[in-house]
Image (cartoon, rainbow, N blue to C red):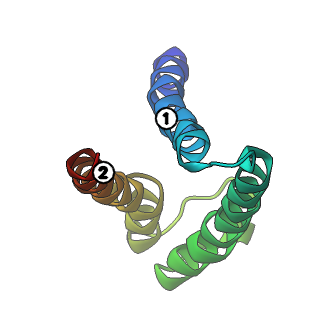
């Protein structure tokens, strides 16, 4: 259990960079005193993304792999396919999406530096 806690803290520290990167980009892109408008749009899009990705998408993935929430509440073991679904939903898919996001930031950063 302490290992999982330490790992969660390290993941949280790494994830904080993604959160701050978005907000710093919003302020860099805003002009004419519209930083508040852009920040509010960013926060609204972020909340919608968490709602769709955090509940709807994860729920669909888990149910597609046969995850049984009543077993989880009761503390019973899940099927092998449900365990694979949990690993995919909480490890594999986010890792792939982070890599895609990093590639987009890299490509867009290069395009922006060429414009300046």
Residue plotted at (56% across, 33% down): 20
- Is 85 situated left or right of 27 in this image? left
Residue plotted at (70% across, 54% down): 38
The quarter of the image holding the N terminus is top right
Q: How many marks?
A: 2
Towards the viewer: 91 or 39: 39
Res 74 seen here: no
Name the residue carrying label 2: 112
Res 17 seen here: yes
Towards the viewer: 100 or 79: 100
Determine whether 92 is above or below 17 in the image: below
Towards the viewer: 105 or 114: 114
Are the residues at dot 1 and dot 2 in contact (C-beta closer than 8 Å)? no
Residue plotted at (29% across, 59% down): 100
User: Could you say whether the residue bearing mark 1 is in a helix, strand or loop?
Assistant: helix
Are there few (<14), some (14-19), or many (20+) residues within 10 Å of tag 1?
few
Determine whether 17 is above or below 1 in the image: below
Q: Which mark is residue 15?
A: 1
Report the Cα–Cα distance between label 1 and label 2: 24 Å
């Amino acid at each position: 259990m302490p290992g999982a806690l330490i790992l969660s803290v390290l993941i949280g520290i790494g994830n904080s960079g993604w959160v701050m990167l978005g907000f710093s980009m919003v302020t860099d892109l805003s002009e004419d005193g519209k930083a508040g408008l852009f920040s509010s749009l960013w926060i609204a899009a972020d909340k919608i993304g968490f709602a769709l990705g955090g509940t709807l998408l994860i729920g669909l993935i888990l149910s597609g792999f046969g995850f049984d929430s009543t077993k989880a509440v009761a503390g019973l073991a899940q099927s092998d396919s449900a365990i694979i679904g949990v690993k995919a939903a909480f490890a594999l898919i986010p890792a792939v999406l982070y890599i895609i996001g990093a590639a987009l930031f890299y490509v867009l950063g290069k395009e922006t530096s060429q414009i300046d």
